[in-house]
Structure formats: structure tokens, C-alpha cells
Image (cartoon, coloured by chain):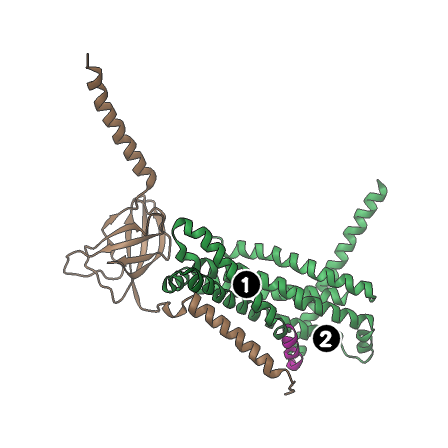
Chain colours: A brown, B green
Amino acid sequence: MQSSRHDAWVGLFVLIGGAALLFLALKAGNLLSLNFDETYQVSARFDNIGGLKPRAAVKSAGVVIGRVESISFDDKTFQAKVTINLNKGALFPKDSSAKILTAGLLGEQYIGLEPGADEKNLVAGDVIRQTQSAVVLENLIGQFINSKASDMGSTTPASGSKP
Amino acid sequence: MMALARRIGAGLRGTLVDVGAATRLLFTLLARSPRALGRFVLVREQVFYLGNRSLSIIGVSGLFVGFVLALQGYYTLQRYGSAEAVGMLVALSLVRELGPVVTALLFAGRAGTSLTAEIGLMKAGEQLTAMEMMAVDPVQRVLAPRFWGGFIAMPLLAAVFSAVGIIGGWLVAVPLIGIDAGAFWSQMQGGVDIWSDVGNGVIKSLVFGLTATFVALLQGYTCKPTPEGVSAATTRTVVLSSLAVLGLDFMLTATMFSI
């Protein structure tokens, strides 16, 4: 093994580079919080998922208890099928309900899980029955305009009957 | 008209010859690499010249890029009331794009030019010919250790650039502007994915390291053995490797971060 006078400096350089990578992985990428916890998979069907994405959080009482695994479209019921990985430590009653919520006004969407009252708990492969779709802004505006229009419609004849 | 066609044809043929020579050199280089890596002390020497000697410029540039990113990011984000997201903005821009790309550009300017000039002068002084006369293969003895030295040094330099840049962003955002430190780090950790962001950044820096080093070696090895030839080759090294890095960056980004 030949050696050269720069070996110590090269070693230092490689160490600095390794430390930088470690810093990026731990401090910026947060490798430690990658959970290798065991999970169980349940699914839920939504009429409309809005902007929900795979890897989105599943929260209950504001605490992250799982992640969205995948989203697919079911052409039998014309609904979106969302597969969810829940942490093994988080057990929920069978009649729990899921709804799609938004963090902040323009924030990203996540699934909120509300516990039900059933004696039995959800197990792997179960389907969450009660779901509530994402709020779509266009639909809200449409409803608003419709209700305004029907208000107008009901007042016009009244004003027309005035002498 | 005829003269124009002849000029276009000659230019096209010259380009083809250049591309062919570059490919041939690349394959010779790869074929001789196992034996060159066997004498690892030569590669270590090159890591010292290409890596250690570039560390200061990379560190200082990274710090200032981090400063500027935090200031500009804060200026825009605070209009939308989400100044805390500046941590995520700084980390994502550095790890995904600026770390690998700016490091590669600085590397081409700092280390690539010195490689080209060194090999060009060796060629002009007929040292490479002398090596061949002594049955020493210049590709194996001179080019291959430099190639692998650049390959090893570049990702480490890019990681140092990104890490120092994030620290620079923290310095501006937290002590200077007064953003909450906890929100700064948690936003960053929420937004940066270890494989798709940090990992792809490392892959990018490996590709750029290979590109910048190879362009520098090629320009030195194929330059005209005159003072003017060496100076022209050094200029071409900077121009070509910068263009190649920016072009490759677009293609890599398009494949890596498309949804």
C-alpha cells in the first residue's frame, strides 16, 4: 500500500463530505422519523377526493396515525378508492368515519379519521363505510349561485305583483 | 452556394469526428480504469487536488447562496403569511437543484480548467508522447486517476455546498429575521424527502462530476499542443462543461421530479 503526504487531508475531506451528507439526511430529510412501524391496510371510498395525494397524512385528533398508500378509480361505483396504511398502535372502531380535510385555507389535503362507537375494531382489509368527500370550491360556488337564483326567483313574482 | 454547402458539410464532419474521438476516449478510459484504480494512491492524490483545494470556494459560495435564498424566500413568502416555509424553500432548492448545479459550475471553473491546462501542457511539452515511448499508457497513468478523482470529489463537494447553504439559510432566517427555529426545521423536515430529494440530488452530482471531469480531460487530451491551443482548450472546457451540466440538469430534473 503506497501512501502519500496528502492522505490525511483527503481523509478529512471525505469525512467532511460524509458529515454533510449525514446532516442533509438527518436534519433536512429527517431520516430518523421515517417510521418502520408496522402498519395495517384499510380502504375507504370517496365520491370526490379533491386534491388528495399518495403519502398524504391520516390524522385523528390532529395526530398523524397513518399515510395514504394509493389512490385508484373504481369504475363499478364511480368512486375513488383510497388505500390507507394505519399504524399498528392506532386501533379504531369498525364504524369510524373518514373525511377529507384541508390544512389551512390553501394547504394540502389530508384524511381525518373520527372514531365511532362499535365494539369491534378495524382490521386489515376492512373498508371504512362512512366517508365525507373533499370540499370542491367550484361546487360550493355553484350551490351558492343556485340558492341565490332561487331566492331571486321567489322574490321576483312578489315584486311583480306589486301595483 | 457550393462553398456554403461545402462549409456546412465540413463543419458537420468535424463535429462527427469530435464526437467519435470523445466516445473512443471515454471507452478507453473506462477499459483502463480497473488497473488505474488498482493504484489507488494516484486517485487519492487527485481527490486532494480536485476536492480539498475546491473546498474553500464551495463552502463560501454555499454560505452566500444560502443567505440570499433565505432573504429572497422570506421576501416572497411573508406576503402569503407563510414565512416559516422559508426553511423548506431553502432546503429543497439547494438539495434538488442549486447544490449539484452550482457546485458543478464552480467545479468546472476551479478544477476542470486546471485539469485541462495541466494535461494540455503535458501534451505540449511532449510528456505524454514520452510516456508512450516508455510503454506507459498516458490514459491509464494520467487521465483515469483524474477522472475517478473528480467522480469521488464532486458528490462530496455538492453535499458540503447544500449543507453549508442550509446553515447559511438558517443564519439569515432565524437569528437575523427572527423566524421561529422549530418551525424552520420542522417545515424543512416535512418538505424534504430523503430518497426523492436528497438521493436524487446525489445522483445528479455524480452525473455532473463525471461530465465536468470528462469534458476537462477530453479538452486537454485533444488540444492543439501550442500555447494558443492550450488556452483555447481551457476556455472550451468552461463553456462546454457549463452547457453540458445545465442541459443534463434539465433532462435529469424532467425525469426525476415528474409526477
Q: In this picture, is B101 found above or below A12?
A: above
Label 2 to label 1, Cα distance in Å? 35 Å
Mark 1 falls within which chain? B
- Residue identifier under label 1: B64
Give, as a three-letter code, the residue at label 2. Answer: Val
Q: Does the magenta stretch include residue B21?
A: no
Residues shaded magenta: B38-50
For residue A154, side relative to residue A56 (left or right): left
Which mark, residue A21? none
Label 1's element?
helix
Q: Position of residue A116 (x, y in %)?
A: 17, 56
Q: Which corner quadrant holds the N terminus of chain B?
A: top right
Give, as a three-letter code, the residue at label 1. Answer: Phe
Residue B223 visible, this angle: no
Q: Which of the two discs, 2 and 1, labels the residue nearer the N terminus? A: 1
Of residues B220 and B239, the one nearer the viewer is B239
User: Residue A95, located in which quarter of the rendered image?
Assistant: bottom left
Which mark, residue B142? 2
Q: How crowded is mark 1: few (under 14 residues within 10 Å), some or many (20 or more)?
A: some
User: Residue B214, located in which quarter of the rendered image?
Assistant: bottom right
Give the residue at x 52% y 58%.
B68
The secondary structure that dominates the magenta segment is helix
